Amino acid sequence: MPYIIRQATLIQKENSHHHSKVDILIKNGIIEKIAKAISDSDAEVISGDDLYVSSGWIDMRVGLTDPGNEHKDSMANLLDTAAFGGFTSILPLPNSNPKIADKSAVSYLINSSKDHLVTVMPTGVIEDPNNKNDLAEMYDMYESGAVAFTNGDEEVSNGLLKKALLYTKPFNGIILSHPSDKSLEHGGVVHESSVTVATGLKMSPSISEYVSLNEQLEVAKYCDTSIHFSCISTAESVEIIRKAKDSGQQVTCDVSIFNLCFTDEELLQFDENFKVYPPLRSESDRIALVQGVLDGTIDAISSNHSPQNLEAKAVEFDYAETGVLSQQFVFSWYTKYLSQDIPLDTFVSCLTQGPSSILNQSMNQIEDGAQANLTIFDASKKWNLNPSNNTSKSSNTHEWEKGQKGKVVGVFNNNCVKLY
């Protein structure tokens, strides 16, 4: 069936139609025509009161529950949720059970997502799960389709990081790191601040992140390689990366939508759905992260989506698993919390151009004859996440059945379409 996206404002910098309201005709997964007005009586019309269209969004950080924890989400659930949130490509963390540590595991991810609208871009672990302080089979995983390597939330020693950076350098392998000094975290579950001290919860200071980040930057500089920092959360991290970029160092980073929108003030509710990693920081940290997005220090915005079943969350805060459902809310949270501070162009770029550049891939263009890889979203559309539209097996969010404004209404990719 052909489709017409009707009178949508196109958002793609350097596109001749950027900021213009256009009709887009799509047939057989191909963009056939872009014009001010298109007529096709056979086409299904996609319209809205405040409609936008951009190239398909890329999520740089998603929790992986398949294999091993399919009771939280299967691969099919994960991909359907990504599409619902507007993402046409995702990078799942390799911390499944077992971990994504060899070529067969990478092949499993690719095969289990075959023929789905959402493209899975596998990541593999850096450290061999069976031989600590040794590298995993990184080149084999790369040859099988892994686009990057990361230990997720687990600490990587500077020695192992150096090995990984030098080993992947000949084939331009990408290292993603969430910097964390576990000895400084002290097993903390919330940010260390004057706000959280009254809660009595174990606290994790921001120094545990930015000290590790500074060390890893020095290791990457020594190796003369690039490095990407995943889910930075502190003002100090932003400033360190800003200075490194200004000096010409090859460094990129992303930030979680959760850390852009919420602060440690939320923890006073003792709501387990605000227990995330990295933890919610102070308002000054949040403001610094927003400024980092605005000035280009931060290259991408990720969802840090992490499904958790009821039994993992409906316990005391100390014992609850970290993570929330967030892919579904990325655009509505932008609309509610960030649209006054971050221009829509910048937000979309952090979901499209930024991730593409980090991964050394060309961004999908919106032009005649191109494959349709598109995200369509309506800034005025009202909705809520409830049992009828939740594509995840989990429901770990403080936003359950609460009103939202700003919704993804459709995605195109891989000659597939989903409309909401």
Image (tube, grey):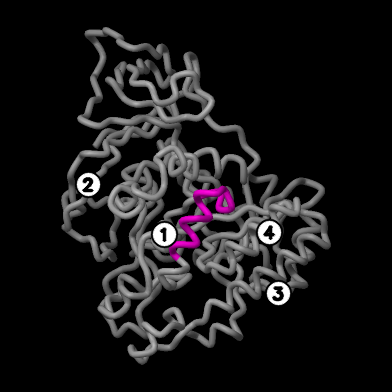
Magenta region, residue range? 286-300
Residue 31: which quarter of the image?
top left
The kind of residue on which mark 4 rests is Lys
Q: Earlier in the sequence, mark 1 or mark 2?
A: 1
Q: Secondary structure at mark 2?
A: strand
Upstream in sequence: badge 3 or badge 4? 3
Q: CA distance from mark 1 to mark 4?
A: 21 Å
- Residue sitting at x 54%, y 38%: 353
* Crowd around label 1: few <14 · some 14–19 · many ≥20 (10 Å): many
Q: Is residue 287 above or below residue 266?
A: above
Mark 2 lies on residue: 405
Kindly tell me whether residue 413 is visible in this rendering. no
The residue at the point 30 percent across, 47 percent down is 335
**144 left or right of 366 in image:** right
- Residue beneath disc 4: 243
Q: Which mark is first along the chain, 2 or 3?
A: 3
Q: At label 3, which amino acid type do we have?
A: Ser
Q: Are marks 3 and 4 in contact (CB under 8 Å)?
A: no
Label 2 vs 4, first from the N-terminus: 4
Could you say which is closer to the camera, residue 102 or residue 6?
Answer: 6
Label 3 packing within 10 angstroms: few (<14), some (14-19), many (20+): some
User: Is 287 included in the stretch rendered in magenta?
Assistant: yes
Q: Separation of disc 2 and disc 4 at Cα?
A: 37 Å
Which numbered dot is residue 157? 3
Q: Secondary structure at mark 4?
A: helix
Residue bearing mark 1: 260
Question: Gap in Å between the C-alphas at discs 3 and 4?
Answer: 23 Å
